[in-house]
Image: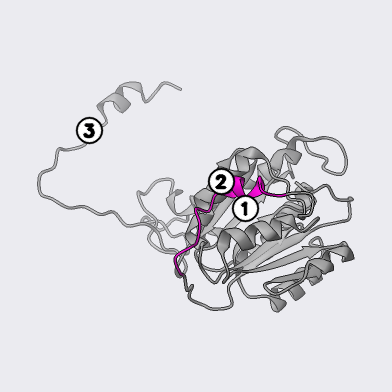
Amino acid sequence: MSQLRIWVIKIFVVVSTKATLQCSTPSGPGDILSWMKTRGLHHRRVNKWTTYIETYQRYLNKFRGCNISVLELGVQSGGSQDLWLHYFGPQAHVYGVDMERATLRFNRPRVTNFIGDVGSEEFLRQLRNSIPRPHFILDDASHIPWHQKFAFEQLWPHLAPGGVYMVEDIDTSYKKRRPFNGGYKKEGTFIEYAKSKIDELQAFWSCENSPVCIDAKGTCSDGASTVVPVTNLTLSASAMHVHDGIIVFEKNSGNSKSPARSLDFGMMKIPKRYVAYEATKDKP
């Protein structure tokens, strides 16, 4: 939700330095809204939309008490870094990226901020080489659609297995004014980009004439290829969710994904007939 100049892109990361998460029982109820209400004049500012709170808690509760690393695009006043340290607990480390050098003052044990532009491929390469693989990435940067797409393409592969990637303030995909240059169903916005990711996630299910895909290359059982090409997202994402103002991507917890297999148990079976379909197959 941070308001940035057009050339400013911010990143905040929480990452684990170990391959396997080590978790302890989290302290406190983990109520983000209650914690936010305790912020006074002497605290760093944190600003969130009401609908975001439930989404955060739904997907991030599993990381509470764990030695995770978090990456958030957008540091601004530093209040969100305080939020994540409180929510995830004393084993978490937060990495932030901003183009404002003033954000370096927020560096302290378990908080490391970098100065850079997430619209820069070179900077993001250096960032990936400088931090552990995050378990949670939150894009709360410039909200410019092409920045959101570019950051996702660059950072999704670096997300740890089982990790969560959130892009918030996606309303900018509908805003025509500069610097967003969005619009309803306008090509190039993050919303339209996310819609294409639905197809990629379903690539293994896109055989036109045969019932199943038989390998991770997208080969159907009749020898044809899937209509939707298999991509890195097909192989690495377990789910994507569209919430009020936020789109959430979840990564597989293990190795690359393979096509689903049918599970069939029991002996009694009623034959399947498409009677209703046969009666209506010529209708549009």
* Pointer 2 residue: 55
Q: Which residue lies at the image location 64% right of the left edge and 39% below the top edge?
A: 50
- How far across and how far down the image is residue 195, in percent? 61, 43
Is residue 61 toward the left or the right of residue 159 in the image?
left
Q: Nearer the viewer, residue 36 or 177?
A: 36
Magenta stretch encompasses residue 35: yes
- Mark 1 vs 2, N-terminal side: 2
- How far across and how far down the image is residue 94, in percent? 67, 67
Q: Give the distance between the C-alpha atoms of the residues marked 2 and 3, in whole angstroms.
A: 41 Å
Q: Are marks 1 and 2 in contact (CB under 8 Å)?
A: yes
Occupied quadrant, residue 191 = top right
- What span is in magenta? 24-39
* Pointer 1 residue: 166
- Magenta part, dominant SS: loop
> Element type at marker 3?
loop
- Which label belongs to residue 273? 3
Q: Nearer the viewer, residue 43 or 20?
A: 43
Q: Are marks 2 and 3 in contact (CB under 8 Å)?
A: no
- How far across and how far down the image is residue 204, in percent? 45, 54
